[in-house]
């Protein structure tokens, strides 16, 4: 259950980072995807792509 909560929060923070163009929200979403992966590693295939793309998106956003 905690895995799903972290994933839902990550989606929310990534959406905020996208629409508000804030790097902090994008980084928070990427970290939450990483936490969700650590909490339930059996479902890594569902969050690993989103996690990698979130970190790439954070790196490409301007300050």
Image: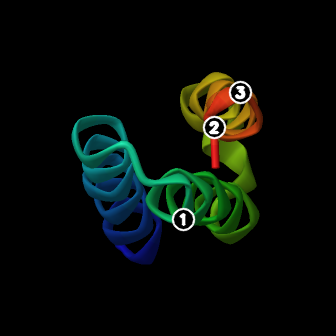
Residue at 74%, 28% in the rendered image: 56
Residues 1 and 30: in front is 30
The image position of residue 36, as x and y in percent, is 59, 62
Crowd rating for badge 3 (residues with CA inside 10 Å; few <14, some 14–19, many 20+): few
List the residue tagged with mark 1: 24
List the residue tagged with mark 2: 62
Work out which residue is located at the far front of the displayed protein and give it.
63
The image position of residue 44, as x and y in percent, is 69, 38
Q: Nearer the viewer, mark 3 or mark 2?
A: 2
Tags 3 and 2 touching, CB below 8 Å: no
Residue at 69%, 46% in the rendered image: 42
List the residue tagged with mark 3: 60
Asked if residue 3 lies left or right of residue 27, the reply is: left
Residue at 54%, 65% in the rendered image: 24
Q: Quadrant of residue 35?
A: bottom right
Residues 14 and 2: in front is 14
The CA distance from mark 2 to mark 1 is 11 Å
The image position of residue 26, as x and y in percent, is 51, 51
Crowd rating for badge 1 (residues with CA inside 10 Å; few <14, some 14–19, many 20+): some
Q: Is residue 42 above or below residue 45?
A: below
Quadrant occupied by the N terminus: bottom left
């Amino acid at each position: 259950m905690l895995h799903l909560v972290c994933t839902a929060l990550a989606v929310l923070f990534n959406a905020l980072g996208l629409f508000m163009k804030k790097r902090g929200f994008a980084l928070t979403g990427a970290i939450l995807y990483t936490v969700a992966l650590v909490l339930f590693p059996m479902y890594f295939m569902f969050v690993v792509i989103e996690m990698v793309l979130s970190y790439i998106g954070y790196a490409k956003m301007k300050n």
